[in-house]
Structure formats: C-alpha cells, structure tokens
C-alpha cells in the first residue's frame, strides 16, 4: 500500500513536471509572427519583466477587472503558495543537500503562516465556487470540469486542514517525513495509517495528473502570452518569424505591384 | 426604422443578464467563390432555380478545417497559448460592447473563444479526446461552423476583453484564427473579402481608380481655394516629395473624413512640407488584419513599400485610421520592411497626429483656438490605436498626443467618463470588418456603451462634438449615432478641428 502510494506520487510529480515542460517547450517553439502586445506596453525588456511580475504576483489585470474574483482568486493563490512552502518541510532533509534552506522553512513564522493559509485557501475557493454558481454569466461559461477542479483542490485543502486542526485526524508527521524522504531516494517506507492522509495524497496525485492536460495550463500560459510579454518596439526593430521570412522572398512578385 | 429594438441609453453602465440566442439569426453575407479565390481561399457555389445561388462549404471541409486549425496553432504562439490557458474566471464576461448591447451570452468574450476552443479541445487535447463532455469539447459539425460564422462576425477584434483578462487572452486573435479557418473552407465574409479584392485590382477599398482619385483631389483644391483663397495643394504621385501620406480612402469622399484630409493638407501647406499621395498606395486600411491573414495583410502592405520606393520619398505618414495605424505601427516593418531607404530621423511610419503635434509645439502653425469656441469637444479613443499600437516614444503616447493636438486647437475639451476611454475605451461597434449593412442590427446594439458615455458627457459637460482618428469609427458614428438621437455633424475628425483653427498665410475667410 505505502509503496503503491510512493509510486503514485512519484509518477504524478514526474507527469506534472514533464507535462508542463513539454507545454512550455511547445510554446517556445511556436513563433509569434507579429507584435501584438496589448498597449500601452513597455518599451524595454525590463519593463516587460515588471509587467509580468505585476500580473503573476498581484494579478494586476484581474484587479482592474473584477474585485470579487480578484479577492477570492488572489487569496486562494497566495494561500496555496504559503501552504506549499510549509509542506517543503516534509521533503527537505536538514542533513541533506538542501539542508541549508531548512531553517528558512522550519521556523514558526513560515510554518504558522502556512498552517493558517490553508483556511484562506479553502475560503478563497469557496468564494470562486460561489461565483461560478451564483453569477449567471460565469455559470454559463462553466463546464463540469471547472466545478470539479475547484472541488478537487478544496477537498485537498480541507483534508489538509483536518490533519492540522482536528485532533482525531492528527498524523505522525515524523513517520510521514520518513515516508517522503524514503520515496525520494526510492527507499520505500510505511505511510502513517490515516484515511484523511490517504485522501489528501490521492487527490494531490490526481491534481498532478490533471494539471498539464487541463486549463491549469494557465501556469505556463501566463508567461507566454505575446499580448503581455512582448516589448513594444515594432517601429524601432524589425520583428520577423522564420516562416514569414520565406514569404519575404516572394512578396515582390504580386502582379499588381508591377504595373 | 428597424425590426429590432434600439437599446435605451442609461446613465449608469448596466451589465445585462444573459439571454440566450438573441443574435443567433445574424450573420453577414458569404463571399462568392471568385472573391475567395482572389485571396487564395476557396469557395463553392450551388445554383438554384429562380433563386439566389448559395455559397456553401467546400468538399472535405471538415478535415480541411481541422488541418488549418493545426497549421495556425503551429504558426501563432498567441493562438496556441490562448486556447490552453483560459481558466473560465469570467472576468471578461461583462467587458464586450456586443454582449452589453445584445445580451447574447455567446458575445461574452470567453464564450466566443469557447466556440472554437471546444473544437480545439476535441481534436487537439487529451482531455477533449477522451472526456469531451467533462471539459466541454465537441465535434466539428456544419452547425458549429454556422455558429462560428455568426459569432466570429459579432466580434470587432477590439481587444477590450484582453486588457481585463488575467492571462492576456486576446479574443481578437481567436476571432482572426476562426475567420481564417472559415475562409479556407469556403466561408469567407463578402464585405471584407470583396474589399480586399478591390485593393488588389484597383488600389483602394472604395474601388476608386487613379483617374477618379485625381479628379477628387483636383476638386478639393478648388473647393479649398474657393473657401479661403489659399491654393492648398493635394499632390498625387509627385516624385521626389519628402512625405508619402497614406490615408484611408474614406478620406477622399466621406464626411467628416474629408475635412480631416483638408486638415492634413493645410498643416503641410502651412509648414512648407513637400508631400504626396500615391495612387498605388491610395489606401491605408488593411482588411487583411480583420480576416487574420498574414499573407493578405502583407500583400496589401507591399503597395505602400512599392509606392515609397517608386516615388523616392523620405518618410511615410499615416492619416487618421485606427486599424490602419495598428498595421502601420505594429506590423508594417515586419510585413514590408526594413525601411532603411527612408530617413531614419523619423519613425517609420509616423502618425499624422505625431507630425502635427510636433509642428504645433515648434510654433510653426498659426492657430486661433477661438475659431472652435462654438464646440465642446470630447475624444473617442479608437480601439486599434488605444490597445494595439502607440504614438510618440513612450507607452501611452497614443492617448496624450491626439488630446494634445485637440487641446492646442480648441478651448473646450473634456474626456468622457473613466472606464470608457484610454485602454478601456469602448469600440464604436463597427470595427473589425463589421462595417457593413448586413450587420446593421449588431452595429446599432454594439454602439450602446459608447453612446451612453457620450450621452452622459453631453448632459453633464455640455459636449457638442466627438472627435475621432479612425475612418471606421467616423463612418459608424455618423451612420448609427442618429438612432440614439445624435446628429451626424456631431462627429468630427481631429484634423478637421485643426483645419478650423489654423490660419494660413493669405487666408481670407468667407463672410457668414
Ligand atoms: S478573463 Fe481570460 S481567463 Fe478569465 S474567462 Fe475571460 S478569457 Fe478566460
Ligand atoms: S475583442 Fe472586443 S468585440 Fe471581440 S470579444 Fe473582445 S471585447 Fe468583444
């Protein structure tokens, strides 16, 4: 059983990383033949980095666009990031290679932020789900998978919270850690016996598998949108895609150009 | 006036509840096969006894459509990324003027994208291949194509939705891809494609031949001289001129466009600038943009390069046209560049507003602002200028420069309410290749947010005139704003205001 889970989690992680890398590679390999930044757009690369940072860190466009979606969405994502950092304590060996970041993670501030973030994570998701159900426009555009995805992450959050806050669901985290570290070195150890933990881990694995084949592709997508990541300098610098270079060779030969 | 209801103007913006199917019935005429072929597309005609022939999908359309979609996914990063990254957050759902005006949920940007995305998912993604219901994927059928044809011609490619999308998803790019796919299976749009055909055979959207153009310009010279007793020239094909002016052909005959053209000519005259129009490049508009065709857009752009070389000019200046400025500013260098044979001290191309503002700032124009005192002016930011191009040398110049020109020639200027100007501007309702009578209902409904904002500016600030720097906006406004009780002459060209305020040497004003 424990070995099965170890393999499942490893497979999900590999699938997720591989899938995202594959997508990012596909995006990079696909040319953007025209300059299409949504203007006003930065005129320098530094400006573009700043623009993207504002989008990724603060969800700047969403903020302009819809305050409710922004509040819930931002709350969820920030909480997710904090909870993620808290979880690093399970996979970092204080005496191992990455031991030097151990104090950064295993300290009361990061750990309690991560712990309480879980509550906001669930609240944010609940808000997003409520919007999806209550706002007619959003309901119209929602497919079953859109609801399922929210519910999936919500259950992951709730099961995680239970293990932190509900005494009867507490687990032996020392044992969990040795399972995780063991998994990473293919030395499979026993998982603590806990239904809640099994649910948590199963759904995390599901999430890992779903991510690269779903709309969760917004993660690489946000960096590759030419509308946001292009420098606005078309008059100063000629921008040309490889496939378009071939057209340049024949563009003079249209009949109407020669009369 | 029409068999549909003209929406009511409200003081505050109202986001409607979606009402399904309100615009399902509307789609533009399909292009005839010969016009399709002229653009390197295909078409098929079915003759019908005693009836109009029908233009239908070509044989093998299904596979051809999927193949074309794959081709575009591989050539346009934006299209590929936008197909993948929408999270259905709904932030864009209330941002489209066509949704606001028609209430049809398929006019919500994300729903519009989904018409295509559902097919993308079915044929190009794992989830859509194996769990179509779950992720909202569907097979490509004839009904789906019809739905595409209808709703991808209810998008003016204005990019307002993209400004508000957390992932920068640009529905305009999706619409362009959809139109390009449809054109490859026999469903091109008549209005766009016939116009492009005219550019190839005659040289401009209007189909105005060289001779007729020369006559128009001659007539203009006479009119202006009659008016103010100054021989302002409108040179055509003048070899060795410094500046080639490329302007939308509507400037040659439509109101108020032509008053803008007179304005450019007066500015050139007053500053002793040597300039010319070209019969080969007698069109700034480039409808290749609207149909998402790189090849056709390039072919149209090449007329400008060729004309610049033939005439031996040093600079290229664009007249007032929104989408033309997008193609000029953002794409011309790519499509028809490099322009190393032109004077590198000036941007290639330059916008007429950039040109005029420079002259105003240098004090080279004799301006009497009080000549516009009968007006209180506001400015409509045209989508393609506001969100798809720039002016000057800093981000946002496209907002300041036209306003600076207006403020230099008018005493009374006010902006419309925030959220309806600058990069959040609302489309005029007729952009993106929809400026055709067969889409009148859409144009009337789609103008609603702009008309409301204008109405508020009229009521609150006493605005009398709205200026624009786009030929399509001006045509749409003069035709459709009267449905809401405005008059045609309330729409002005920016250079019309310049023309009113400028005093040329030797000018004698007619006595009223
Ligand atoms: S705002 Fe962007 S991500 Fe959100 S629903 Fe619209 S297109 Fe999709
Ligand atoms: S590009 Fe403009 S017209 Fe098209 S969906 Fe977006 S907001 Fe609507």
Image (spheres, coloured by chain):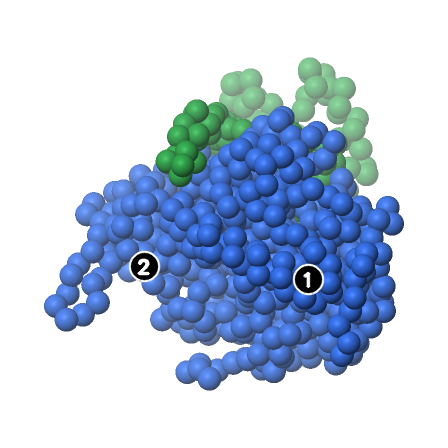
Chain colours: A green, B blue
Horizontally, residue B250 falls left or right of residue A67, namely: left
Horizontally, residue B444 falls left or right of residue A68, namely: left
Quarter of the image where one finds residue A49: top right
Residue A196 at x, y = what percent? 55, 45
Q: Chain of mark 1?
A: B
Q: Which residue is mark 2?
A: B30
Identify the residue at image location x=70%, y=19%: A98
Quarter of the image where one finds residue B466: bottom right
Asked if disc 1 is less than 8 Å from ligand 2, the answer is no
Identify the residue at image location x=86%, y=46%: B362
In this orientation, which residue lies closer to the viewer: A85 or B430?
B430
Q: CA distance from mark 2 to mark 1?
A: 45 Å
Q: Which residue is mark 1?
A: B225
Q: Which of the labelled discs sits on residue B88, or is there none?
A: none
Residue B511 at x, y = what percent? 77, 76
In this orientation, which residue lies closer to the viewer: A198 or B357?
B357
Nearer to us of marks 2 and 1 is: 1
Horizontally, residue B9 falls left or right of residue B143, namely: right
Identify the residue at image location x=77%, y=51%: B270
Question: Dot 2: few (<14), some (14–19), or many (≥20) neighbours within 10 Å?
Answer: many
The answer to whether residue B318 shows anywhere in this view is: yes
> Which of the image's four quarters has the C terminus of chain B?
bottom right
């Amino acid at each position: 059983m424990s070995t099965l889970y170890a393999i499942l989690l490893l497979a999900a992680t590999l699938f997720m990383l591989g899938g995202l890398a594959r997508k990012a590679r596909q995006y990079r390999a696909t040319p953007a033949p025209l300059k299409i930044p949504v203007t006003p757009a930065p005129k320098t690369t530094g400006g573009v980095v700043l623009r993207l940072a504002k989008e990724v860190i603060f969800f700047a466009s969403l903020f302009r666009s819809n305050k409710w979606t922004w509040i819930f969405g931002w709350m969820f994502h920030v909480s997710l990031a904090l909870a993620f950092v808290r979880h690093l304590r399970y996979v970092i060996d204080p005496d191992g290679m990455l031991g030097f970041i151990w104090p950064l993670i295993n300290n009361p501030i990061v750990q309690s932020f991560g712990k309480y973030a879980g509550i906001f994570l669930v609240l944010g998701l609940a808000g997003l789900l409520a919007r999806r159900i209550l706002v007619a426009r959003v309901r119209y555009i929602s497919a079953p998978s859109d609801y399922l995805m929210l519910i999936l992450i919500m259950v992951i959050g709730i099961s995680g919270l239970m293990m932190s806050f509900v005494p009867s669901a507490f687990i032996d985290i020392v044992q969990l850690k040795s399972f995780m570290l063991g998994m990473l070195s293919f030395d499979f150890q026993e998982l603590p016996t806990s239904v809640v933990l099994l649910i948590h881990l199963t759904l995390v694995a599901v999430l890992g598998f779903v991510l690269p084949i779903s709309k969760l592709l917004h993660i690489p997508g946000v960096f590759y949108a030419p509308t946001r990541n292009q420098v606005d300098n078309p008059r100063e610098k000629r921008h040309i895609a490889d496939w378009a270079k071939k057209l340049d060779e024949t563009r003079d030969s249209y009949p109407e150009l020669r009369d | 006036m029409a068999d549909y209801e003209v929406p009511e103007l409200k003081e505050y913006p109202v986001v409607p509840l979606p009402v399904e199917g309100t615009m399902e019935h509307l789609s533009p005429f399909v292009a005839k096969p010969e016009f399709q072929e002229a653009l390197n597309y295909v078409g098929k005609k079915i003759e019908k006894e005693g009836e109009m022939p029908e233009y239908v999908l070509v044989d093998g359309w299904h596979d051809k459509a999927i193949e074309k979609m794959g081709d575009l996914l591989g050539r346009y990063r934006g299209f590929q990324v936008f197909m993948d990254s929408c999270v259905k957050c709904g932030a864009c759902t209330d941002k489209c003027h066509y949704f606001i005006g028609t209430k049809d949920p398929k006019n919500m940007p994300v729903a519009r994208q989904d018409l295509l995305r559902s097919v993308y998912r079915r044929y190009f993604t794992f989830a859509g291949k194996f769990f179509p219901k779950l992720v909202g994927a569907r097979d490509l059928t004839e009904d789906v194509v019809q739905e595409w044809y209808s709703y991808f011609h209810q998008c003016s490619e204005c990019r307002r939705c993209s400004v508000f999308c957390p992932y920068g998803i640009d529905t305009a790019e999706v619409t362009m891809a959809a139109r390009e796919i449809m054109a490859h299976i026999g469903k091109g749009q008549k209005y766009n494609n016939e116009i492009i055909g005219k550019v190839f055979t005659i040289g401009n959207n209007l189909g105005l031949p060289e001779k007729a153009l020369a006559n128009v310009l001659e007539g203009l010279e006479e009119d202006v001289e009659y008016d103010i007793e100054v021989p302002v020239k409108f040179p055509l094909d003048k070899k060795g001129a410094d500046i080639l002016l490329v302007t939308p052909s509507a400037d040659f005959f439509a109101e108020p466009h032509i008053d803008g053209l007179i304005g450019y000519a007066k500015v050139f005259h007053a500053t002793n600038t040597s300039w010319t129009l070209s019969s080969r490049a007698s069109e700034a508009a480039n409808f290749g943009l609207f149909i998402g065709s790189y090849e056709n857009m390039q072919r149209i752009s090449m007329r400008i390069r060729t004309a610049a070389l033939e005439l031996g000019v040093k600079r290229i200046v664009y007249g007032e046209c929104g989408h033309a400025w997008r193609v000029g500013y953002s794409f011309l260098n790519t499509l028809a560049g490099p322009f190393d044979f032109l004077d590198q001290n000036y941007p290639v191309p330059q916008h007429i507003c950039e040109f005029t503002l420079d002259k105003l700032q240098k004090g080279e124009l004799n301006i009497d602002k009080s000549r516009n005192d009968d007006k209180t002016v506001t400015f409509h930011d045209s989508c393609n200028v506001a969100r798809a191009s720039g002016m000057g040398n800093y981000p946002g110049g496209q907002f300041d420069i036209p306003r600076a020109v207006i403020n230099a020639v008018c005493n009374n200027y006010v902006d419309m309410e925030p959220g309806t100007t600058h990069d959040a501007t609302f489309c005029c309702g007729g952009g993106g290749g929809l400026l055709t009578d067969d889409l009148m209902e859409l144009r009337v409904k789609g103008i609603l947010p702009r008309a409301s904002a204008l109405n508020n500016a009229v009521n609150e600030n006493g605005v009398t005139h709205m200026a624009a720097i786009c030929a399509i906006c001006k045509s749409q406004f003069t035709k459709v704003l009267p449905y809401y009780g405005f008059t045609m002459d309330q729409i002005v060209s920016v250079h019309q205001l310049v023309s009113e305020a400028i005093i040329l040497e030797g000018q004698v004003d007619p006595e009223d």
